[in-house]
Amino acid sequence: MNRILIKNARIVNEGTITEGDILIEGKFIKEIAESISAKPDVKVIDAEGNYLIPGAIDDQVHFREPGLTHKATIESESRAAVAGGITSFIEQPNTVPNAVTQELLEEKYQRAAETSYANYSFMMGGTNDNLEEILKTNPRNVAGLKLFLGSSTGNMLVDNPEVLEKIFSSTPLLIAVHCEDEATIRQNLEKFKAEYGDDIPVKFHPEIRSAEACYISSSKAIELAKKTGARLHVFHLSTAIETDLFTNKIPLEEKKITAEVCIHHLLFSDADYEKKGSLIKWNPAVKSAEDRDALWKALLDDRIDVIATDHAPHTLEEKKNPYTNSPAGAPMVQHAVVAMFEAFHQKKITVEKIVEKMAHNPAKLFKIEKRGFIREGYYADIVLINPGLPWNVKKENILYKCGWSPLEGTNFKSRITHTFVNGQLVYNNFKVKDVRCGERLLFDR
């Protein structure tokens, strides 16, 4: 049996930081104590006073398999994820074909079982005409249902109000939504196309995919959730006005309506389009510095519950197309945790709060079994981070299949030194080991 003893760690868990040791046996955390004696058959790792945190759980990624594997694969992006301290991910259904039947959904699980370095779950996709398939979904082993209420691919835009209400009323699944009002976006887009044609300057992206478009859609989704009693999770908030739709008056475990913010909406503002161009073109758009500040405020006061990546790689050639043909999205899983630690160094957030929003809360919100915390008997999905070991993001150390990052050239003060998935060391100081030990996430529902 695999036995590893991590000594002299600063263990960050459930709002506290304590100095101590952790013993891993097999897949699980066997013991947590101030001091644990090493036995002859135990491999010892000296944490040297660095932070030990539960592995991050990313509740929104696009790993592009099947059908878009020239951009990314489950293997390539889960490899980047564990290098970035993300030990579990929830992937979205807008692959090709869209995962909107039980058969197509299970094919993705089978592929991940063969190739994933990290633990995995896949969202079932909703359409205007697949309610029967949605209702077959097992809430025990599927993270939830994804509905595109804007910015969809394939046949995944759910824009029939009667269908939406029927889905919200019928499914026990957590419903995760992308909220942007298509009619508002189309109207804005036509105005700019009339002036610029297809080559619209990307700085107008937040005016086309506007705060108004986001608010119209998210407020409608929340109104419907309140009406039907559905369990609603709103992905990637990007505006100040939306933050007031959510509450911090009750504990997360009692919330029926929750919210997520993505790394890029916390890092960038519309001032960055001049330098970064389409590399920071996301849907919803990166908006103003005032919006960014409001998102930080809502994150820290617990109106926003989760930090995620919306990892969505495209090739550089695709991103360099004129505005209307340049796809939205960028890779982020390898750099998300260290980006938040940079915010810690800037005194914007505590390490305890990073762990809460990137590990504890996703586990609570999705009711993930035995993950997201450092507890005896839980899976040993854990990460060691040295907060004083600088490094620079450059092409040679980018692991995404697409080979680029909007953070290229960034200097980070913190470095992930070790990542464990199910008790196995899968990453150590810029080297990913050939250990694909990710497992299907299970949910306590």
Image: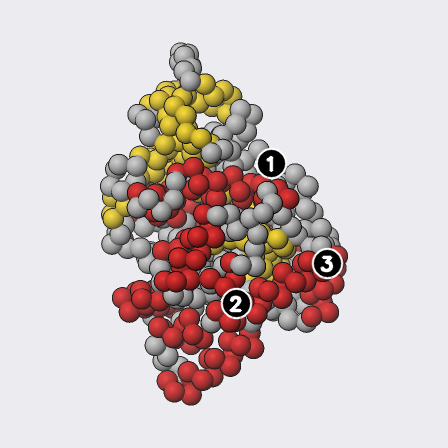
Q: Nearer the viewer, residue 303 or 4?
A: 303
The local secondary structure at tag 1 comes to loop
Identify the amino acid type marked 2: Cys
- Picture coordinates of residue 24, whole percent (x, y): 47, 23
Identify the amino acid type marked 3: Thr
Marked residue nearer the N-terminal end (2 or 1):
2
Q: Is residue 444 left or right of residue 22?
A: right
Q: Residue at x 37, y 79 (%)?
A: 200
The residue that mark 2 highlights is 214
Q: Are marks 3 and 2 in contact (CB under 8 Å)?
A: no
Q: Is residue 84 left or right of residue 259?
A: left
Is residue 134 visible in the rendered image? The answer is no
> Distance from label 1 to label 3 (Cα)?
27 Å
Marked residue nearer the N-terminal end (1 or 3):
3
- Picture coordinates of residue 356, whole percent (x, y): 48, 40
**Placement of 375 over or under 293, stated as above or below:** above
**Placement of 401 over or under 290, stated as above or below:** above
Label 1: few (<14), some or many (≥20) within 10 Å?
Answer: some
The local secondary structure at tag 3 comes to helix
Q: Nearer the viewer, residue 242 or 71?
A: 242
Q: Residue at x 30, y 46 (%)?
A: 346
Kindly identify which numbered label has been placed on residue 369: 1
Label 2: few (<14), some or many (≥20) within 10 Å?
Answer: many
The residue that mark 3 highlights is 228
Taking the view exactly as shown, the residue that stands out farthest to the bottom is 194
Q: Residue at x 45, y 47 (%)?
A: 300
Is residue 21 visible in the rendered image? The answer is yes
